Amino acid sequence: MKKTVSLLLMLALLLCGFAAAEAGGFELGHMEDSLYVNDEMGLAFEVSDVSGMGYFVSYAGDDLTDANGCAWNDSEALQAKLDEDQVLTCFAYGDASARIAGAINMVKITVESPAEGADDPQLAMLEEGKAALEAQAKENGYNMEKAEIGEMEIAGATYPSLSIDLESGGHHKQMTYVAILGGDHVYRISFDMDSSEVASYVSHFSAR
């Protein structure tokens, strides 16, 4: 079971996206009490008591130093990594109360530079992620039963999305990804949970 959970979390981390750009610099968003705010992406996420049980962990600010390899507010270093086509983590939220046997519901936001020459950077990001996940799933013994591009409404706006359904030994795993264009970058919100559970987490996003 632990091996399966670790693999699924690894697959989820392949597809995550978003951040915040400002004149003369770059940052990953910030916390305002229990609210994660990303003005460039145009959204905020309320991290407290999403599931109604209050058992969660969230990562933002200094907590992201190890994940990104530099300080969260080092705009020059962050921009250099984006220029090298690296994906940066802006925010991560894990809700351990929503699952059993050690698995968690996870919401993660990452950011990266758009695909060069792409007419639709958001859609291009999801198409690339779809191909990467299909290859990764096959390598690890999973069947990709569904990988569909669609749309999702968040805080009154509609964005392109990717829905994934994996199967292994009769066990199913669903993930959803949403791509958002902000400034010169593309942000991605990943929902590592069954599709029936996504709505309750989407409701905790608000427009900025």
Image: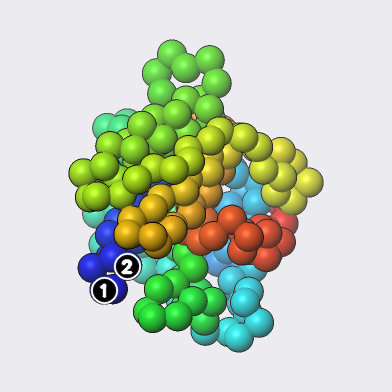
Q: Observer-nearest residue: 86 or 32? A: 86
Q: Residue furthest right?
A: 156
Q: Residue at x 47, y 25 (%)?
A: 124
Question: Which residue bears the numbered disc 1?
Answer: 2
Colouring of the image = rainbow
Q: Residues within 10 Å of mark 1 (few under 14, many from 20)?
A: few
Q: Quadrant of residue 179?
A: top right
Q: Marks 1 and 2: in contact by CB < 8 Å?
A: yes
Where in the figure is residue 130, as x and y percent of width and height? 41, 35
Q: Is residue 74 above or below residue 196?
A: above
**Image position of 99 (left or right of 72):** right
**Residue at 61% of width from left, 63% of height from top?**
197
Toward the front, the furthest residue is 170
Residue type marked 2 = Val
Q: Which residue is label 2 attached to?
A: 5
Q: Amino acid at mark 1?
A: Lys
**Element under disc 1:** helix
Front-most of residues 98 and 58:
98
- Mark 2 Cα-neighbour bin, 10 Å: few <14, some 14–19, many ≥20: some
In the picture provided, is 2 more to the left or to the right than 130? left
